[in-house]
Amino acid sequence: MTILLLEDEYPAAERLQRLVAQAAPEAQVVAVLDTVSSALAWLAAHPAPALILSDIQLADGLSLEIWEQAVVPSPVIFTTAFDAYAIRAFQANSVAYLLKPVKLAELQAALAKLRQWPGAAPPPDLAKAASATLPPASSNLERLLDALPRPGRPYKTRFLVRQGEQLLPLPVAEAAWFISRNETVTLVAADGRRFVLDYTLEQLESLLDPAQFFRLNRQVIAHLPAVRRLHPHFGGKLLVELHPAPSEEVLVSREKAGAVKNWLEG
C-alpha cells in the first residue's frame, strides 16, 4: 500500500510514520509533504497513492484546497486538531477523521475501515482502494456526525491552574501566549505569571477561539492582545514581538506569514 503523508510539523510527521509502520507494516510512505502547492505538484506527477494521510492545516493553507483544485481519487484519513473542518473533510473522500494526537488503535481502526470501504479491494491488497467507487457525500456526512468525538463543543473560557498547593481558575482572556518546550506546555499570563498545563498545543488549537488565538509556529500559540508588532525577518519570515516578552525569538515561517497578517487584520 502506498501512502502520501501531508503534515507541516516535523515531529508529527515522524510520529505518524512510526504509527504507520506499526499499524500497516506492508505500507510504503512514498512522500512527506508540508504544503498544498507541493502536494498538488506531486499528485500531478505521480500515480494516485492508495491512501493519503493528511493534516488539515498545512504550511500554506488548508489541505482541503487540494480537493477543491484537483480530482484526487485516493481515499483520505485526516489527522488534525480542528473539529471545525470535519464536515468539509468528509466531502473529500475521507475514510476517517482522527483528532491529534493520533493513537495507534485509532489509526488501525481507520485502516480497517478502509479495507471495508465500498468498492475497495479485499485485504491485504489495498492498492486498488484509490480507484474505489465512493458512497455519496451525504452518506459520508452521516457517518461523520455519528463518529465525531466532540461535536458542538464551545471554546474554552478558563483553565484550572496550579499555584503552589492551590488550584485556581484562570480566565482564557488573561492568557498571553502558550509555549511548548521538552513536551511541556506552559501558559504565560498577561501579567507574566507562568503555569504548566496538561495539554498539547494541538489540543489547545481545538479548544481556543481561532479568532483570538493563532499558532505562530511549532512551539507558540499567541493571544491577539499579546501581539505588539511584526518585524520583517530574513527569508521572508516574520519576527513576532509579544508581551510579556519570551526569552527566545518567535519566528513565523514565510509560508505562514500571510495567514498571520490576515488573522491580525481580522
Image (cartoon, rainbow, N blue to C red):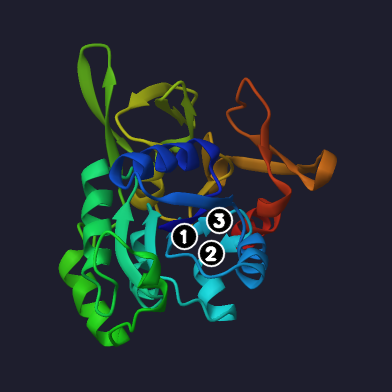
Crowding at dot 3, Cα within 10 Å, few <14 / some 14-19 / many 20+, comes out as many
Q: Quadrant of residue 246?
A: top right
Residue 46: quarter of image: bottom right
The residue singled out by tag 2 in the image is: 62
Residue that appears at 49% across and 30% down: 179
In the picture of the structure, the residue carrying the numbered disc 3 is: 58
Residue at (39, 37) in percent of width and height: 18
Amino acid of disc 3? Leu
Q: Quadrant of the N terminus?
A: bottom left
State the image coordinates of residue 81 (x, y, percent, origin top left).
Answer: 37, 52
Q: Looking at this rendering, what residue extends furthest in the top direction?
A: 164
What secondary structure is found at the residue carrying circle 3? strand
Q: Are circles 1 and 2 on residues that touch, CB within 8 Å?
A: yes
Residue type at mark 2 is Leu
* The C terminus - image quarter: bottom right
Q: Please give left or right for residue 114 compared with residue 30 in the image.
A: left
| Depth check, front residue: 95 or 193 | 95
Crowd around label 2: few <14 · some 14–19 · many ≥20 (10 Å): some
Q: Which mark is residue 186?
A: none
Q: Is residue 79 above or below residue 73?
A: above
Residue matched to label 1: 56
Residue at mark 3 to residue at mark 1: CA–CA distance = 6 Å
Q: Residues within 10 Å of mark 1 (few under 14, many from 20)?
A: many
254 horizontally vs 126: left or right: right
Determine whether the residue tagged by mark 1 lies in a helix, strand or loop.
Answer: loop
Give the percent coordinates (x, y) of residue 144: 24, 71
